[in-house]
Image: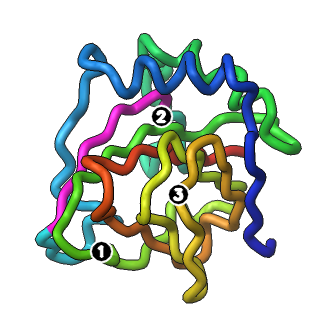
Amino acid sequence: MKPYTVDNFLSEEEFTNITGVVGGPDIDWHYSYSISDGSQEEDDMYFIHMLYMGLAEMPKDGIMPPPPKNSDYYHLFEPLFAKLPDFKLLMRAKINLYGRTPEIVHHPDHIDMKQEHKGAVFSLNTCNGGTVIDGQKFDSVGNRILFFDPTKPHHSTSTTDVKRRLNVNINYL
């Protein structure tokens, strides 16, 4: 699949409902020591808010884990999930918060999951950060979504021109 973007993916009202909460003081953020896949040492860090974490692959012991718990803010993102092309099943959705850095930092390449599936990055604000796939940078523009193959190497960047870069990473079937 060739990566592509769609601008103004949500209505202004749907987008404002999300950004009003995500940009506010009440949402809980969790520190992550690794931006990519945790397989290598990194000096960078970011914060995440897990909206939904389903089963990425079958457990090796065959015992199914308890069903995932949705974030209290999951309902705000349902219009986003409903508009995803060929959407059948949500595998994972998380909000990422990257802090401002003095220079743009390119994080390590990674893949999201080995299993064949679809991926998207939905930008919640506009900044000079982005997502890089095969050497091409896709800019972070508020209410823009990037569709791509998350089983292929890609990486995020930090931002230098605003306090934080906010986006939603979505993996789905």
| Residue displayed at 63% across by 61% down | 115
Mark 3 burial class by Cα count in 10 Å: few <14, some 14-19, many 20+:
many
| Residue displayed at 73% across by 31% down | 10
- Which amino acid does the dot numbered 3 rest on? Ser
Residue extent of the magenta highlight: 44-52
Q: Position of residue 172 (x, y in %)?
A: 68, 44
Relative side of 78 to 60, left or right: right
Q: Earlier in the sequence, mark 3 or mark 2?
A: 2
Mark 2 burial class by Cα count in 10 Å: few <14, some 14-19, many 20+:
some
According to the picture, the residue beneath numbered tag 2 turns out to be: 53
| Observer-nearest of 52 and 29 | 29
Quarter containing the N terminus: bottom right
Q: Position of residue 88 (x, y in %)?
A: 81, 35
Residue 43 sits above or below residue 7 on the image? below
What separation in Å lies between label 3 and label 2 (alpha carbons)? 24 Å
Q: Earlier in the sequence, mark 1 or mark 3?
A: 1
As drawn, the label of residue 140 is 3
What separation in Å lies between label 1 and label 3 (alpha carbons)? 13 Å
Quarter containing the C terminus: top right
Judged by its main secondary structure, the magenta piece is strand
| Residue displayed at 39% across by 32% down | 50
Mark 1 burial class by Cα count in 10 Å: few <14, some 14-19, many 20+:
some
Dot 2: element? strand
- Which amino acid does the dot numbered 1 rest on? Ile
Q: Position of residue 143 (x, y in %)?
A: 63, 41
Q: Earlier in the sequence, mark 1 or mark 2?
A: 2
Dot 3: element? loop
According to the picture, the residue beneath numbered tag 1 turns out to be: 104
